[in-house]
Amino acid sequence: MTTTLLAVNVSSPAFAGPADQVRVRGTVVSLNGDQLQVNSREGKPVTVTLKAGWKVSAVAKASIGDIKPGDYVGIASLPKAQGGDGALEVLILPPQLKGMGEGSFGWDLKPNSTMTNATVADAVKSVSGSTVTVNYHGQEKKISIPDGTPVVTLAPATPEDVKPGAVVFVSTEKGTDGSLSAGQVVVGKNGVVPPM
């Protein structure tokens, strides 16, 4: 998984990638030159070396009503006891990223979660939330989106937004020596944090 963003790199926070990929979620401790120090959600210090020309994007609050047929989305979800999947978060991706990382694959937001990058076929609202039908590689999947599920889209950001205390999501590549590097950072801004 490489990571997307408005600077539109060829990847997105929701995209899958090689097995040597490590997703870092946490709070910025510092950014010194190309060295990003993060306190991970597991409470561990993590150092990420940012590649030359690295890009940053923020997330902006969106709503279920913003999801339209034809949109390209990344939806993290969990299987529901009564069948089907229930969304944990929804990322509405920019049109230029349509098709990137398409598919449904294991995700590490929560145990047993999956990430589905797909095109919305239809969206149906109900009293208890909404359900979207998404299509990828000729397959169809229905995912319920309970009320209160975080729905975001990508927004502009600058390296200055990657400051101590900011919440980040970074899809990194793990080197043979165990070091982590990345070309993209997704940062929380204006009170909206990356839910991925």
Image: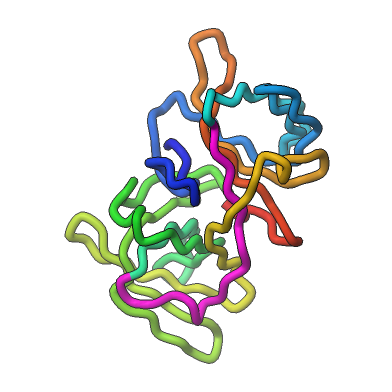
* Towards the viewer: 111 or 1: 1
Question: Residue at 43% of width from left, 52% of height from top?
Answer: 115
Q: Position of residue 149 (x, y in %)?
A: 60, 69
Question: Against 176, is 15 above or below?
Answer: below
Q: Position of residue 174 (x, y in %)?
A: 51, 20
Question: Residue at 38% of width from left, 41% of height from top?
Answer: 10
Question: Against 82, is 51 above or below?
Answer: above
Residue 60 belongs to magenta span: yes
Left-right relation of 128 to 106: right
Left-right relation of 193 to 3: right
Question: Residue at 53% of width from left, 62% of height from top?
Answer: 153
Q: Position of residue 14 (x, y in %)?
A: 46, 49
Q: Position of residue 144 (x, y in %)?
A: 46, 73
Name, please, the residue furthest toward the top.
177
Residue 27 belongs to magenta span: no
Name, please, the residue furthest toward the left.
138
Left-right relation of 162 to 22: right
* Residues shaded magenta: 54-70
Question: Against 195, is 140 above or below?
Answer: below
Question: Residue at 22% of width from left, 61% of height from top?
Answer: 139
